[in-house]
Amino acid sequence: MALNGSQIIARALKRMGVDDFFFIMGGPMLLVESECIDQGLRAIDVRHEQAAAMMAHAYARLQNRPSVCMAASGPGVTNLITGVAHAWADCTPVIALGGSAPYSTKGNGAFQEIDQLAMMEPCTKWSERVYDPARIPELINKAFQQAMSGKPGPVYLDFPGDVLYRDVDEGSIIWPEPWTPSKRAKPQANEADVASIMAALEKAERPVIISGSGIQWGAAETKFQEFVEQAGIPFYTTPQSRGVIAEDHEFCYLTARSSAFREADLIMVLGTRMNYVIGHAAPPRFNADATLVRIDIDPTEIDTSPRVDIGVVADIKIALEQLIAACSGKITPTNYKSWRDRLAGTNASKVAEQEKVLANDAMPIHPLRLCKEVGDFLDRDAVLVVDGQEILNYGRQSIPTYTPRHRINSGCFGTMGVGLPFGVGAKVAKPDNQVLVLHGDGSFGLNAMEMDTCVRHKVPITVVISLNGGWTADPEGDKPGRDLGYKRYDLMAEAFGCHAEYVENPDEIRPALERAAEANAAGKPALVNVVTDHTARATTTAFTRYTT
């Protein structure tokens, strides 16, 4: 029996456990998509290819495994690039599959001929072009392996049209055993490194832990919490790893973050990069005299670390198990009680200040009041996606997360427009969880057509827009191109078939959210458009003088 390349792709994806994929139809991938549907995969067709990659990104984070997006040749693949680059920056295992012009006519000016592989290589962990249909199962298996091994990240496979339509004898195809994360290398920390960390813990008076997405990808959430509780160390997370421990935990002091970083004499960086997100763990944000410990699965992260005293290359779950065993009877919560009490006092005073604004009844609505209403409304295990500028920063300050992987935002690439696609991908991945997207109005416009995707595919999420009339706060009125106007995005959503509301009074927010939830329960997406104060400027870390 003969199989063509498209049929082989569909069967290979099925063998890899793929249940859903995100795409826009188009040649030469159309037959691939049809064959995938025949294999029982759910096909979510979207309105822009970047949204397909972003949906796959959120799906991968929620499912803790690679997710697939597809695009047609030429502009279809180039449209994927922003979403793939975002996955690269956030170390997320997105499998991007793209059709391309026939390889047999390379250089002859074929339709949509462009070197897609060269464009994808800088923003992927691994990229490859397929020349022989018989090798498709091998290369798809390798794509999943590359995406999840070590530090996760996106990969790209390029499929020329003549490869997709070529027949090969089924007997000539080798179907490898599907790769799974259980086959990853899991190095442990050497005994000398564990001893060095123990010595640092015994000497320290003011330790902090900063954890990243490596905790989730390494399935180490339980061990991380066990270590934190056994040692009694205050913990903080990068934005994409919030909820790894519930943020109402007694050792979590969210609003004392700056004080904790500045005063800590021991900084433990676990499973995250030392980039601008954590101020490179350098002064002035961090104590220059603090001892810095890093544990990461990726040796290059340790080798290129701008600052490290004890660098450990290890599987994070295994390393935590080693530290738990080493700390037993030696490091306990009593070691750092006075330090935690100081942070608790700072946290309490800042929370009290914030509460005054959270209860503000002024009109136009302060974004923090909107955040309070959203936070009070959310289920404890809800998935919250936040995208924008002011609302992103206000949400970071005021809305806690309690469940691992259930908080997604614009990430370290700072891509505007990820919110709605992330919400769709999250709901497809977790259909039984409440999913809410808190959007700035500027960022919403970039992928607003995905409200249509929600309606067509019956993806019942709630989108809440902070409508401050522009791209950022502008109290001085001096930012060119900032103003977008107070647009009725609710009317647009209503035209697509969504439940939609327009809110100007803070007392109207909660009732509108409850009606949106009722619409979601009936299978209908909802959008709540909330007018907010355009002069409200969130205070946050200045990443660079070149940002807005």
Image: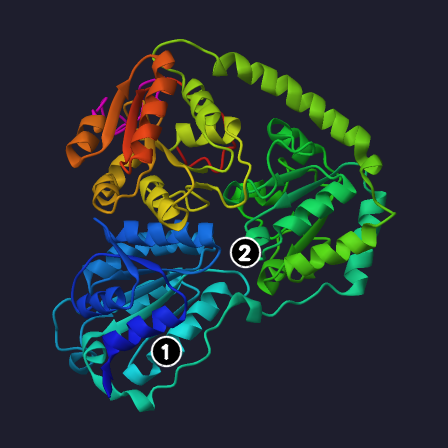
Q: Is residue 146 magenta?
A: no
Q: How is the image coloured?
A: rainbow
Q: Position of residue 511 (x, y in %)?
A: 35, 18
Q: Secondary structure at mark 1?
A: helix
Q: Is residue 78 above or below residue 29?
A: above
Q: Which residue lies at the image location 84% right of the left edge and 35% below the top edge?
A: 334
Number of numbered discs visible in the structure rendering: 2
Is the residue marked by circle 2 packed among few (<14), some (14-19), or many (20+) residues within 10 Å? many
Question: In the image, is residue 471 above or below residue 136?
Answer: above
What secondary structure characterizes most of the magenta part? loop
Q: Read off the residue under disc 1.
A: 137
Q: Residues within 10 Å of mark 1 (few under 14, many from 20)?
A: many
Residue at 46 percent across and 37 percent down: it is 382
How far across and down, in percent of the image, does residue 48 sit? Answer: 23, 50
Residue nearest the viewer, comparing 264 with 256: 256
Which quadrant holds the C terminus? Answer: top left
Q: Earlier in the sequence, mark 1 or mark 2?
A: 1
- Amino acid residing under circle 1: Pro
For residue 195, which quarter of the picture? Answer: bottom right
Q: Residue at x 30, y 14 (%)?
A: 504
Q: Is residue 539 left or right of residue 438?
A: right
Numbered badge on residue 217: 2
- In the image, taking residue 505 as reference, residue 406 lies left or right, namely right
Q: Nearer the viewer, residue 416 or 26?
A: 26
Judge left or right: residue 445 versus residue 537: left
Query: Front-most of 311 and 97?
Result: 97
* Disc 2 residue type (three-letter): Trp
SS at circle 2: helix
Please tell me whether residue 489 is drawn above or below residue 167 in the rendered image.
above
Q: Which residues are magenta?
A: 473-488
Give coordinates of residue 102: x percent, y percent: 18, 77
